[in-house]
Image: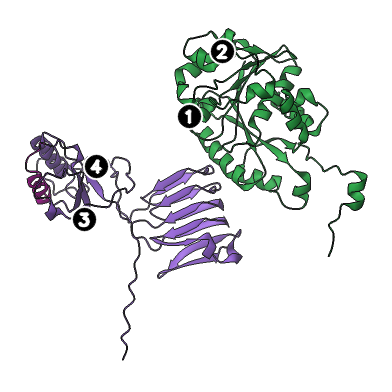
Chain colours: A green, B purple
Amino acid sequence: MAKVLVVTSGKGGVGKTTTTAALGAALAQAGENVVVVDFDVGLRNLDLVMGAERRVVYDMINVIQGDAKLAQALIRDKRIDTLSLLPASQTRDKDALTEAGVASIIEQLREKFDWIICDSPAGIEKGAMMAMRYADIAIVVTNPEVSSVRDSDRIIGMLDSKTAKAERDERIEKHLLLTRYDAGRAARGEMLKTDDVLEILSIPLLGIVPESVDVLNASNLGSPVTLNSPTSPAAKAYFDAARRLRGEKFEVAIPIQRKSLMGRLFGRRAVA
Amino acid sequence: MTETRPFIRLRGRSIMALVLSPEPPLAGWLASLDAQIERAPNFFDGRPVIVDLGTLPRETADVAGLMHAIAERGIHIIGAEGAHASWPGLEAWGRKLPGGGQSAKPIEVPERAQAEPAAPAARPAAPEPSPPPQMQSPTEPASLLIDHAVRSGQSITFEQGDITILGSVASGAEVVAGGSIHVYGALRGRAIAGLSGRTGARIYCRKLHAELVAIDGVYQTAEDMPPERIGAPSCAWLDGDLMRITPID
């Protein structure tokens, strides 16, 4: 049974596209047939993070409007052959998305792939609504800070009311992914505690991804972090999250701050 | 000797007004209105009514006469809106009402009268029980139960009575009740209780992190709440015109 997953957040810049690419690659490496779909029409980024920006011929809007077939728009990843990308249009905007068009694309994708991961744009307007509309599972990406948490709460409310599943009175499976977690700041009390975020949002925790330069490096190289630096702490967190999505149950590890020897010796603040 | 001026105190009060929207042909509409009044003679008693003239075409004649016709039927009109500038005689019905105001869902008029009149001889021996009316009078208790958390951006409104929430109310969410509000969780959003003049309404929560609490128009924002109550089980209530927030044990 194909599963449609939406990666959403409400707030911008928290790590949705990074997560879509990283999880997609992790699941594909485990042998699943995965397609990642960019719903951010007009501000597309997924193609950059996947390293496919020079191979985009047709995009999702072309398929919706009948200018191209779905197979022509899908771009297979060069590194993992069970991973594909359906890019968004950069020249159009979200008004070009139609419910019937999106429904048809999702149906066609369900026949070919095991996992369809929809990268939602930020916000609560049409692009975000279309991305979550046909989802079975939602990953709510949140940074442990107050504005991100409030926006995520709003998005969770919409997942429970505006999706096709919600309209059929079924529950959409929701998971929380905490990203850009900074262990040092958490230790100093400068970031919201994981427990506080969980108490406010009340959805199960999928994983905690630490703040990491590996993510930025991977994105610059056009490769998902799980492909580019698979042993980095961020990639490990994504691999764990992918395993949980496939049904494995195990404890979420809280990232610790690794200090170098010099950092440990001289890490205290100067006292005047 | 200096004169001290009396202090003018203003408060807000919300009441629910009914909106009547006459539609052409007017004779037919007035006949339907009469039929409705016959089915439920007490329905309009004491209720403030606004007449929305926006659905009438511009060429309608004698709109002032229509307003008289409605008022003659014992309907307490407090204003009209949507009137076209060219219609004469509407000044008597008061100034334009301020725009906005939340429009509520359509209201169903109860099918049968609330009090059965004295039965004539032809009626069967046992009087038929009347079904509970849709619009309940303020003294009858009514309660809405929400068995999940209220998420940011959601707004729960229940004018007829109390609201009970089994879960938390998120920051940016709003709960509006005619009666009291009971939150079995953290209250992080806004709670507005005691609509339609119920000064005895209260707001209860397990953890007080509310952005704003209001009872019958008297409100208090988070800034002014007693600091020892923040995060603790609390009850907000009106002591005269003062909002008090006290512990619940």
| Nearer the observer, A46 or A182 | A46
Give, as a single range, the part of the protein colored magenta: B59-73
Numbered disc in front, either 2 or 4: 2
Mark 4 and mark 2 in contact (Cβ < 8 Å)? Answer: no
Which amino acid does the dot numbered 2 rest on? Tyr
CA neighbours of label 2 inside 10 A, class few (<14), some (14 to 19), many (20+): many
Question: Disc 3: which chain?
Answer: B
Residue B70 painted magenta: yes
**Magenta portion: prevailing SS class:** helix
Numbered disc in front, either 2 or 1: 2
Same chain letter for marks 4 and 3: yes
For label 2, the SS is loop
Which amino acid does the dot numbered 3 rest on? Gly
Question: Disc 1: which chain?
Answer: A
| Distance Cα–Cα, label 2 vs label 1 | 21 Å
Residue at label 3? B46
Mark 1 and mark 3 in contact (Cβ < 8 Å)? Answer: no
Q: Which mark is residue A100?
A: none
Mark 1 and mark 2 in contact (Cβ < 8 Å)? Answer: no
| Distance Cα–Cα, label 4 vs label 3 | 16 Å
Residue A52 painted magenta: no
Residue at label 2? A58
Which amino acid does the dot numbered 1 rest on? Lys
